[in-house]
Amino acid sequence: MDRRFLYKSGLLIAFGVTFGGFAQAELHKFTSKDGSKSFEAELTHYVPNQKLVEVRRESGKVMKFKMAVLSEDDQKYVMKRAPALKVAKDLKVSAKIQIGKKKVVKAKPTKRTTIPKSYRVTFRNTSNLKMEDLDVEYELHWVRDNGSGRKGEEKVVAKGSTLVSAVFPRQDLSFNTEAVNILYKEPFGGTG
């Protein structure tokens, strides 16, 4: 599953998109044509007219090579995933935080403010082909700054999924994630 993260306003969204029934980001053991060498990597790109394969190792190193150096089984693996790789390249994803109406409860010793937050996720199909049957899974993570300016405590606050039946060529498709009520507590009466 291709997982992408966007961080905004303390709420982090992680989402994955499954194309045509199989996940994109998976490690595969590739073997050379003669069987003498093998390694694990994620298939990231295939260029059909050059028969060029691109993979990313767990270390992050990107490797490019001709498909002819791979075993017959690995060549079949690449060809089976080639259409989804094309979709992954042509599908652009953005997310914009949506903030609902806040509710404030003033009760000693603390004031409690609840703000509903969600994301508007937009898929843009940059290709000339219709993309079908995209299974989208998302998680919303609440990230609290620990006072040092660095990311502190993080917890999953919502999960969801949706099936996108089609994203038409050169068009956008949007959906909203589930809203999460974020609770802020502060001393009642302020510092004044």
Image (cartoon, grey):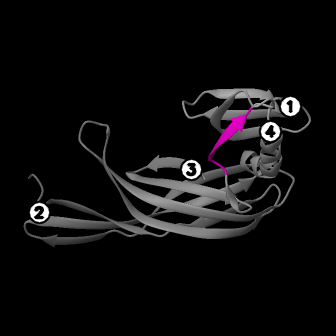
Q: Work out how far the residue at label 3 is from the one at label 4, CA to CA, in angstroms.
A: 20 Å
Rendered view: 46 above or below 59: below
Residue at the spot of label 4: 46
**Mark 1 surroundings: few (<14), some (14-19) or many (≥20) residues within 10 A:** some
Residue 26 located within the stretch drawn in magenta = yes
Question: Residue 38, how many percent across, how many down?
Answer: 67, 31
Lower sequence index among marks 4 and 2:
4
Lower sequence index among marks 3 and 1:
3
Residue at the spot of label 2: 188
Q: Nearer the viewer, mark 3 or mark 2?
A: 3
Question: Residue 162, how many percent across, how many down?
Answer: 61, 70
Q: Quadrant of residue 113?
A: bottom left
Rendered view: 107 above or below 43: below
Q: Nearer the viewer, mark 3 or mark 1?
A: 1
Q: Work out how far the residue at label 3 is from the one at label 2, CA to CA, in angstroms.
A: 41 Å
| Secondary structure of residue under mark 4 | strand
**Mark 3 surroundings: few (<14), some (14-19) or many (≥20) residues within 10 A:** some
What kind of residue is marked 3? Arg
What kind of residue is marked 1? Ala
Q: Give the magenta part as a residue range.
A: 24-31
Viewed as shown, does residue 181 lie left or right of 65?
left
| Secondary structure of residue under mark 1 | helix
Residue 68, label in figure: 1
Rendered view: 130 above or below 76: below
Residue at the spot of label 3: 3
Question: Residue 166, how many percent across, how many down?
Answer: 76, 66
Q: Nearer the viewer, residue 145 or 72?
A: 72
